[in-house]
């Protein structure tokens, strides 16, 4: 009974250490005032650049999440030292959150300036 309890607790701890998928990461606040001086064409360009960087960071984060999930499965089923390969969230997750915040700030600046830029949700 005690071994099962310890194994269950270890499994829960390993799952908690897994990296989150990019869609589970909240946006970090970025002030729309950072974009106040940009013209509408400049805002459109900035939105496009941030979207590209966010997509790349999200792909990297999702790959980390998949790798962590695989390492967790292997460590729980076959080989417990594989648990040390689980990296969890880190710099990439922070970048995803920051870029989501930048996109929200650009969108808010767009609304304030009445630029009419359309933002797609993915």
Image (cartoon, helix red, strand yellow):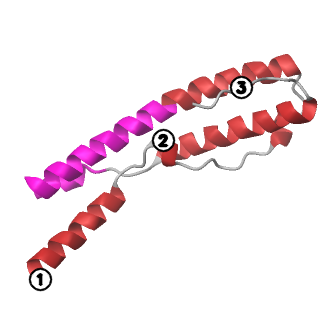
Task: Give the mark, 1 or 3, whose residue is nearer the N terminus.
Answer: 1
Residue that badge 1 annotates: 2
Q: Is residue 122 left or right of residue 77?
A: right
Point 86% across, 41% down: residue:
33
Q: Position of residue 8 (x, y in %)?
A: 20, 70
Q: In which image quadrant can residue 112 be found?
A: top right
Residue that badge 2 annotates: 22
Task: Give the mark, 3 or 2, whose residue is nearer the N terminus.
Answer: 2
| Residue in the foreground of this view, choosing between 82 and 27 | 27
Q: Secondary structure at mark 1?
A: helix
Task: Give the mark, 2 or 1, whose residue is nearer the N terminus.
Answer: 1
Point 7% across, 52% down: residue:
78
Q: Check if residue 98 falls in the magenta segment.
A: no
Q: Check if residue 71 falls in the magenta segment.
A: yes
Q: Position of residue 12 (x, y in %)?
A: 28, 66
| Label 1 Cα neighbours within 10 Å, binned few <14 / some 14-19 / many ≥20 | few
| Label 3 Cα neighbours within 10 Å, binned few <14 / some 14-19 / many ≥20 | many
Please give the range of residues in magenta: 57-86
């Amino acid at each position: 009974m005690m071994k099962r309890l310890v194994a269950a607790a270890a499994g829960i701890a390993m799952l908690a250490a897994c990296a989150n998928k990019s869609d589970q990461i909240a946006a970090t606040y970025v002030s729309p005032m950072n974009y106040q001086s940009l013209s509408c064409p400049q805002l459109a360009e900035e939105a496009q650049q941030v979207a590209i960087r966010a997509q790349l960071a999200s792909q990297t984060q999702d790959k980390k999440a998949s790798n962590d999930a695989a390492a967790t499965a292997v460590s729980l089923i076959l080989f417990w030292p594989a648990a040390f390969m689980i990296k969890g969230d880190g710099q990439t997750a922070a970048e995803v959150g920051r870029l989501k915040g930048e996109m929200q700030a650009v969108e808010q600046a767009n609304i304030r300036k009445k630029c009419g830029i359309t933002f797609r949700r993915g």
